[in-house]
Image (cartoon, rainbow, N blue to C red):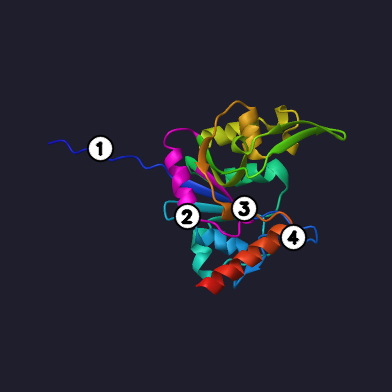
């Protein structure tokens, strides 16, 4: 009796973006909640399905001893699209998940849901539904507004089939305005749909001191409730 062919498993890679600083120059990935910096918090929440991880930036940060085995490559801080392209070259998975070390409260459940969405389409990501309308203005005049239920903000992670991510990155030099776009916006500009996984209010990333104050307050409240 002929044996059944083995199912080929797609290797899953992760890129953790540890670039970025607060206005005062502090590395966001190095900010600490409790005893762990944000980079370690993100690495700790990577699910077991991820077979290799490349950390981009955060050069001065030492990864916790129990997390070192999770990191297969570390690349020096390189701004913009070239850094992301270098990180992609350092991975080998047919599926690539992009995380940020600026996310203070990562959740492995988000990653599992993105991986499930990637079984149906070549790109998927976490988005948080808007809590306010967006206004479009010209000078001192508001021209239009978007209802909140039509407005979503990107969170982490964002996942791609490797071929599509490589295609998007290779289009950067030929896409006007690409330097001012994020990966999600560029992907959509090139005509590729992105599967939507609904995110969490606590899934925000730290971009300024006010985000960091919120993260500290939430962490303190969580510890007090424990």
Q: Earlier in the sequence, mark 3 or mark 4?
A: 3
Disc sitting over residue 204 in the figure: 3
Q: Nearer the viewer, mark 1 or mark 2?
A: 2
At 75% from the left and 28% from the top, the residue drawn is 176
Vertical placement of 153 versus 144: above or below? Answer: below
Which element type, helix, strand or loop, lies under badge 3? loop
Which element type, helix, strand or loop, lies under badge 4? helix
Q: Are marks 3 and 4 in contact (CB under 8 Å)?
A: no
Q: Earlier in the sequence, mark 4 or mark 1?
A: 1
Q: CA distance from mark 3 to mark 4?
A: 13 Å
Q: CA distance from mark 2 to mark 3?
A: 15 Å
Which element type, helix, strand or loop, lies under badge 1? loop
User: Circle 4 sits on which residue?
Assistant: 209
Residues in magenta, as a range: 96-122
Q: Position of residue 109 (x, y in %)?
A: 46, 52
At 55% from the left and 74% from the top, the residue drawn is 224
Disc sitting over residue 5 in the figure: 1
Q: Earlier in the sequence, mark 4 or mark 2?
A: 2
Q: Are marks 4 and 2 in contact (CB under 8 Å)?
A: no
């Amino acid at each position: 009796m002929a044996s059944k062919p083995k199912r080929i498993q797609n290797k899953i890679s992760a890129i953790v973006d540890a670039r970025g600083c607060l206005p005062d120059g502090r590395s966001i990935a190095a900010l600490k909640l409790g005893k762990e910096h944000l980079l370690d918090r993100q690495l700790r929440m990577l699910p077991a399905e991820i077979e290799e991880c490349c950390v981009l930036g955060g050069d001065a940060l030492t990864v916790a001893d129990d997390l070192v085995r999770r990191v297969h490559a570390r690349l020096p801080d390189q701004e913009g699209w070239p850094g992301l392209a270098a990180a992609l070259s350092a991975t080998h998975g047919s599926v690539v998940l992009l995380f940020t070390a600026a996310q203070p409260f990562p959740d492995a459940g988000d990653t599992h849901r993105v991986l499930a969405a990637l079984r149906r389409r070549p790109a998927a990501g976490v988005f948080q539904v808007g809590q306010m309308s967006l206004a479009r203005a010209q000078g001192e005049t508001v021209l239009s507004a978007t209802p909140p239920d039509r407005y979503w903000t990107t969170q982490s992670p964002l996942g791609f089939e490797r071929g599509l991510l490589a295609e998007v990155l290779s289009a950067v030099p030929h896409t006007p305005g690409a330097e001012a776009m994020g990966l999600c916006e560029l992907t959509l500009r090139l005509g590729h749909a992105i599967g939507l996984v609904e995110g969490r209010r606590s899934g925000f990333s730290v971009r300024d001191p006010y985000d960091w104050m919120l993260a500290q307050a939430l962490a303190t409240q969580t510890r007090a409730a424990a």
